[in-house]
Amino acid sequence: KNQVEQSPQSLIILEGKNCTLQCNYTVSPFSNLRWYKQDTGRGPVSLTIMTFSENTKSNGRYTATLDADTKQSSLHITASQLSDSASYICVVSGYSGGYNKLIFGAGTRLAVHP
Amino acid sequence: ETGVTQSPTHLIKTRGQQVTLRCSSQSGHNTVSWYQQALGQGPQFIFQYYREEENGRGNFPPRFSGLQFPNYSSELNVNALELDDSALYLCASSSTPDTDTQYFGPGTRLTVL
């Protein structure tokens, strides 16, 4: 069964600190993996995308890693800001049956406190 | 902003009623996907429309149906609403069905009482 599991479920950190979010997946076929940021009540916005052959991708203070052998990914946030408070969703996509199927994790809810 | 708009923003219905949600895709995009996101969960794929035809469907019952119009805007219709249908409904547009670059709208929050 295609699944994406994220940990931790929620996280509280102080402003300026770093944190790492985890994603494990069992999705086949695999096309790529994205991390999305979703503010409360809003649609997800893509942060990074990695294909099978990429190990790391950065977008400002966000750095994602991918280990396609162990099917694990992480999102590292450096020098957190209050505006980083949001849900971070790991999404794995695989092309099957004529369209790209996106499998979403449940997300990690991050709260950054002053 | 992604250029994808949804209406209404919020909606309250009672069990058994029917609802229609609307989505305008980003300019130049001919593919729209709909997702249901329950509180505290990730989005679940409902279906995708490409050039006015359903192009893929997730594990949702037939009372969830959709339409795509010649201008590629789309509707999601849900009949015989149930309490568990309460969720944020997201639409996402893309330039083709075989690209995984989807741009999400802000969502419609549906509450079923």
Image (cartoon, coloured by chain):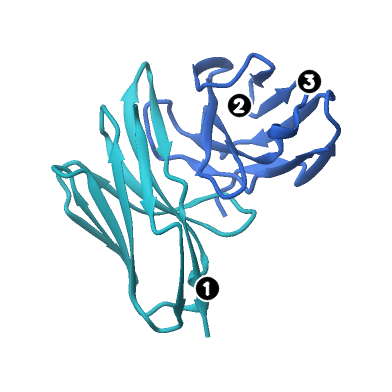
Chain colours: A cyan, B blue
Disc 3 to disc 1, C-alpha distance: 39 Å
Q: Nearer the viewer, residue A60 or B15?
A: B15
Query: Gap between marks 3 and 2, in whole Å?
Result: 26 Å
Q: Is residue B32 in view?
A: no
Residue B85 picture location, percent across and down: 70, 32
Query: Horizontally, is A110 left or right of B61 in the view?
Result: left
For label 3, the SS is loop
Same chain for the residues under marks 3 and 1 in the image:
no
- Looking at the figure, which quarter contains the N terminus of chain B? bottom right
- Residue drawn at x 76%, y 28% as measured from the top left: B20
Q: Is residue A9 left or right of residue B92?
A: left
Query: Which numbered disc, 3 or 2, marks the residue that appears first in the sequence?
Result: 2
Q: Which residue is mark 1?
A: A83
Query: Disc 3 vs disc 1: Cβ atoms closer than 8 Å?
Result: no
Judging by the rendered image, the residue that carries numbered circle 3 is: B80
Q: Quadrant of residue B98?
A: top left
- On the image, the x and y values in percent for residue A89 come to 43, 51
The image quadrant that residue B66 belongs to is top right
Residue under numbered circle 2: B72
- C-alpha separation, residue under disc 2 versus residue under disc 1: 34 Å
